[in-house]
Structures are given as structure tokens and as C-alpha cells.
Amino acid sequence: MSRTTRFSLLSLCLLLLCGCATLPSGQRSPRDPWERMNRATYTFNDKFDKAIARPVARGYRKVTPRFVQTGIRNVFDNVDTTIVMVNDLLQGQFTPLVSDTARLLVNTTIGIGGLFDPATKMGLEKNDRDFGQTLGKWGVKSGPYLVVPFLGPSDVRDIFGKVADSYSTPRTYIHSIYWRYGLWLVEKVDARSRLLDTTELLDRAYDPYAFLRNAYLQHRDFKVNGGQSKNEEEQEQKLMEQMGDDEPAPESAPPKSQPESPPPKP
């Protein structure tokens, strides 16, 4: 059993032990039936973030030169391009597949293992696809919203997607446990440092849990459905049809009035 699979099973077990949080008054989201458990997990993650993850990320940003941060970010993004390529293929996106393959080759060779990003300057744009999105494209429902210990917001579909994606990146096949977990830790610290600028916005929210949940679900809906859910598309289509039925037919042009004859001369 791989490291990611073991960690996911452990996370699910921890979730089952966190079902005693109090819910705020108000209407519950139909996409969040496990809200009580999720809020307990969110509280745990928030305390861990404020006590450990956030200070470490701030220290990393403070002591690490900007160009080094950019290089580290580029390396991880370049290695994980294989995840995007696999999902390009699974979604039938053959033009992006060619572009992403060329991007990986250019950044790995000319970019010295991905430290630099010459592919972007050459017009090879970076795509972002994952197996959770692929499942959504195939018609698999997202399932309930889920907050995973240490990892944060997700849903049932994306949990399976993350496990599948872990087999599409070369990082999974590093045999040295020290290198594997060391790279995983560096990647998580770097990823957390990217989100420091949004932390204050989340802290000022009236209900940070609901704010983060809605932002995550909207982002995933956008990736799968182009920004709107199927229900929203159906409602918009019905609304357009109703507007089309209610639209008055264009009035025919009034007949041209005949010029009045001049009054008879006295």
C-alpha cells in the first residue's frame, strides 16, 4: 500500500472520530451533509495552521530568496506536469497534451530540470488538470464536501482523484524514504507560503469555514463545468427559453401615410 493511500485511510479514520462539533444556526448546505464532522476537522486544521504551518511558511518566505522560491516552485510544477498530461489524455484533450509534453521536455532540458520556465516564454502555456476533474468530466458526482485532516477542503470525488494522481507523478516512485518525505515536506511548506497573502482575507470572514467551503466548491465546479453546475446551466437554459417565449414579436412598420391633399382654393 502506497504512502498516499495509507495517509488517506488514516485521514478518513480520524474524520470518523471528529463528529461532535456544534453547528452555527442557519440553513445547512445540501452539499455538506457532514458539516458537524467537517467543522471539527476544520477547527483542528486551523489550530495546527496557526501554531505550526503558518509560522513555518512565514519563516520560509523570510529567509529564502525570492529567486530560490521561484526555482523550487518551478521544479515541483515541472515534475507534476505528468499528472496534467495523463489527464489531458483521459479527457481527450490532445492539443493540450502535445503542448504539455513539449513544455515538460523544454523545462527539463533547457530549464535545467525545471528550475527555470523557458516554456512559458515560448508560448507553451501551463495547463491544470487532475483526475478529480476528469471524473467530473466523465459524469461522476462530486459527493459530499469533506475536510481532510492536515490537507484541508476536498470532496469524496477529489479524494479518489488525489490518490489516482499520486501514481502519475515521478515523486511517488522515489525509493529513498528520506528524499520522498523530505520533498513532500518542502512542497507543502512552499505551497503554504503561496497562500499567506489570502490568510488575512479568510480570517476576516464572518464564517471562515463556510467561506472556504463555498470558494472550494465554486472553484471545482468551474474546473469541471466551466464555471457553473449542471443545475445552473439547466436553470439558465429554461430562463432563456421563457424570455424567448415572452418576448413580444416585432411590430410591423406602420403603413406610410398618404400625403395630404392641399386644401381647395377659395
Image (tube, grey):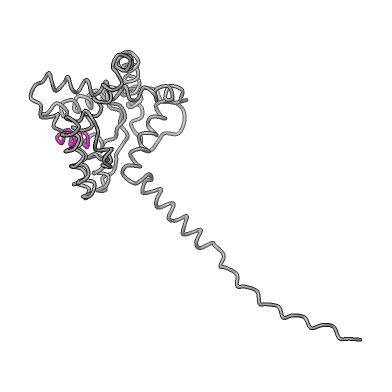
Q: Residue at x 21, y 28 (%)?
A: 115
Query: Can see residue 64?
Result: yes
**Above or below: residue 37 compared with residue 233:** above
Q: Quadrant of residue 258?
A: bottom right
Highlighted magenta segment, given as a residue range: 160-168
Q: Position of residue 54 (x, y in %)?
A: 33, 17
Q: Position of residue 114 (x, y in %)?
A: 20, 30
Please tell me which residue lies in front, 192 or 159: 192
Query: Is 31 inside the magenta-drawn segment?
Result: no
Q: Quadrant of residue 14?
A: top left
Please tell me which residue lies in front, 166 or 142: 166
Q: From the viewer's perspective, is 188 left or right of 169? A: right
Query: Is 162 inside the magenta-drawn segment?
Result: yes
Please tell me which residue lies in front, 91 or 64: 64
Q: Residue at x 31, y 16 (%)?
A: 48
Q: Residue at x 31, y 36 (%)?
A: 144
